């Protein structure tokens, strides 16, 4: 892609030098922390050494007291409780966590995750009616429900006590439930607003623990870490704590389903990273809800039978392979549609519709298209006159706010600034497309349509040491809100001949001369076509600095993001 390199401002040298004296940390690391708003020794210590004991009091969440009181009374009285969740990883892990926690307390509890194509997202009137018919007295939503005002009213009419836990942006009408737990709702004083669905479920679980007892909920942090990384919420504050402690626990999980899934994807249990959780484990849990019924994924997380867990893990792996095949065909067709419409020149947004798309994969493909074209993208899977859409955004464009401006053309919508879901009717597609494009045109400038590659620091070759690698590891886990640092080297000289490697020779590999005893290796995934940029043997490069292990030997490596030819 034709990236625009943007080098972030450095912290004042006097500030960094003073912090270096106080903390003993590498000045480059301190510059990166300063860019992320972490500027005092206490803030640095909190970020680099997060502590489980520093989590926020769950009762600061508005609605928590009412929710805990009602659930405890239901457990004591043996009243049936149902957990109603979403079909993505965040929702499935949240449901599994709540069911296991309530079972531990002796509750009469079951769960329901709606079928994506047959029931759709969220809490429906049909789900409320079914709960009443089956004798449910307490209905708890996780990762959904904040827009279910009509459903909440029906639950109240039927005598069901509804407790909503949801992290999505509240709409204009808050459900009149027994309790609504959402840190983003008006009047909620909870200091951290970016918990995901399973994070809120965990806070509810912690609040349910009897006062004065040893915290027993920590064994669920593997589920919390998996759902949190998969939902791409900022890995800051409590989310950082959950993932920092939850990833090691994921490698030694006591839940047979997670053990089977980790074995299936052949990960090292002692070194599971956030990236592996997102790209290896999460897609297989997601595949169940995308391709068919998320109940298979929930059963995997709830079973205590290792043999059954292995069967389900294999099934989900097969579903994921099918999903990936469908992703590729949908992406190809979407790009053909863009080409047939004259490409993206002069466009500020993409809205594409088809009767042949599976609603379970359009979110993934919309994300890929937004990345390829650097345009806000909406994909709609049509079923007769009804359409279900997934939207993905680009940097600097608030998707949820934009959809709010198109609300008159939509049946419903919900989500975040970067990702959202929606539904609409066929007769409104043209009006929605025009309105969405108009909003994007008014809010985005031409320079916004050129993707930005943010560079944290321009280094010298001598800075790229094992010591810096060790310091950078302290920033992990990486994810949204805490991206892996990106560096720049100017006018580097190549060592040897660059070459194209990998499947279809699509990757680029080369080495650079430096002050070390050995040249530094560099790999650019998907950058094979950029080999001509190295024909002059001198270049500017932008990269992530990481450790590569090969045959038991660990060496520093540059993962190239972009490069440009320069004169010697």
Image (cartoon, rainbow, N blue to C red):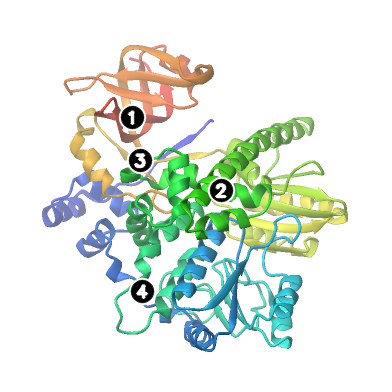
Q: Residues within 10 Å of mark 4 (few under 14, many from 20)?
A: some
Q: Is residue 541 above or below residue 420?
A: above
CA distance for labels 3 and 1: 23 Å
Q: Residue at x 69, y 76 (%)?
A: 131
Q: Reading the chain from its start, which is encountered first: label 4 or label 2?
A: 4
Q: Residue at x 54, y 65 (%)?
A: 95
> What residue would you read off at disc 4?
56
> What residue would you read off at disc 1?
558
The quarter of the image holding the C terminus is top left
Q: Along the line of sight, which residue is nearer the eye, 256 or 94? A: 256
CA distance for labels 4 and 2: 36 Å
Q: Reading the chain from its start, which is encountered first: label 3 or label 4?
A: 4
Q: Reading the chain from its start, which is encountered first: label 2 or label 1?
A: 2
CA distance for labels 3 and 4: 32 Å
Tell me, for residue 268, which label it has, or none: 3
Tell me, for residue 250, which label it has, or none: none
Q: Is residue 282 above or below residue 173?
A: above
């Amino acid at each position: 892609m034709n990236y625009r390199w943007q080098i972030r401002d450095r912290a004042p040298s006097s500030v960094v030098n003073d912090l270096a004296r106080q903390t003993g940390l590498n000045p480059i690391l301190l510059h990166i922390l300063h860019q992320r708003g972490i500027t005092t020794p206490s803030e640095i210590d909190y970020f680099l050494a997060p502590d489980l004991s520093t989590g926020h009091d769950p009762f600061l969440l508005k609605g928590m007291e009412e929710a805990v009181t009602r659930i405890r009374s239901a457990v004591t009285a043996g009243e049936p409780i149902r957990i109603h969740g979403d079909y993505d990883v965040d929702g499935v892990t949240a449901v599994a966590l709540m069911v296991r926690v309530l079972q531990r307390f002796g509750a009469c509890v079951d769960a329901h995750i709606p079928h994506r194509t047959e029931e759709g997202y969220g809490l429906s009137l049909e789900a409320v009616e079914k709960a009443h018919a089956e004798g449910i007295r307490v209905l708890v939503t996780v990762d959904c429900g904040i827009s279910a005002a009509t459903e909440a009213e029906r639950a109240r009419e039927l005598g069901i006590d509804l407790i909503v836990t949801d992290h999505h942006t509240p709409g204009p009408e808050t459900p009149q439930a027994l309790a609504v737990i959402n840190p983003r709702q008006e009047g909620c004083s909870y200091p951290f607003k970016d918990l995901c669905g399973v994070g809120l479920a965990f806070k509810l679980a912690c609040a349910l623990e009897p006062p004065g007892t040893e915290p027993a909920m920590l064994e669920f942090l593997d589920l919390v870490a998996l759902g949190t990384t998969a939902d791409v919420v900022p890995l800051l504050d409590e989310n950082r704590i959950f993932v920092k402690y939850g990833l090691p626990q994921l490698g030694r999980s006591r839940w047979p389903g997670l053990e089977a899934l980790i074995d299936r994807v052949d990960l090292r249990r002692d070194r599971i990273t956030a990236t592996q959780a997102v790209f290896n484990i999460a897609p297989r849990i997601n595949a169940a809800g995308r391709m068919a019924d998320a109940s298979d994924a929930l059963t995997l997380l709830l079973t205590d039978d290792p043999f059954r867990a292995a069967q389900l893990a294999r099934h989900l792996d097969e579903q994921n392979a099918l999903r990936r095949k469908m992703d590729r065909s949908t992406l190809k067709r979407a790009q053909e549609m863009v080409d047939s419409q004259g490409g993206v020149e002069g466009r500020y947004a993409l809205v594409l519709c088809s009767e042949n798309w599976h609603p379970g994969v359009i979110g993934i493909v919309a994300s890929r298209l937004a990345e390829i074209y650097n345009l806000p993208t909406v994909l709609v899977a049509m079923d007769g006159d009804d359409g279900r859409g997934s939207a993905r955004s680009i940097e600097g464009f608030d998707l949820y706010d934009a959809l709010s401006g198109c609300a008159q053309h939509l049946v419903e919508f919900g989500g975040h600034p970067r990702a959202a879901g929606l539904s609409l009717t066929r007769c409104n597609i043209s009006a929605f497309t025009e309105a969405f494009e108009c909003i994007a045109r008014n809010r985005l400038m031409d320079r916004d349509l050129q993707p930005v590659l943010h560079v944290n620091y321009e280094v010298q070759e001598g800075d790229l040491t094992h010591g810096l690698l060790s310091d950078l590891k302290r920033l992990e886990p990486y994810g949204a809100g805490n991206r892996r640092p990106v560096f720049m080297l100017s006018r580097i000289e190549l060592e040897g001949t660059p070459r194209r490697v990998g499947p279809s020779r699509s990757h680029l590999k080369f080495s650079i001369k430096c002050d070390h005893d050995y040249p530094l290796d560099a790999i650019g995934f998907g950058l094979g076509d950029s080999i001509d940029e190295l024909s002059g043997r001198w270049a500017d490069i932008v990269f992530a600095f990481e450790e590569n292990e090969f045959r038991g030997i660990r060496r520093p490596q540059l993962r190239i993001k972009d490069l440009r030819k320069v004169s010697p």
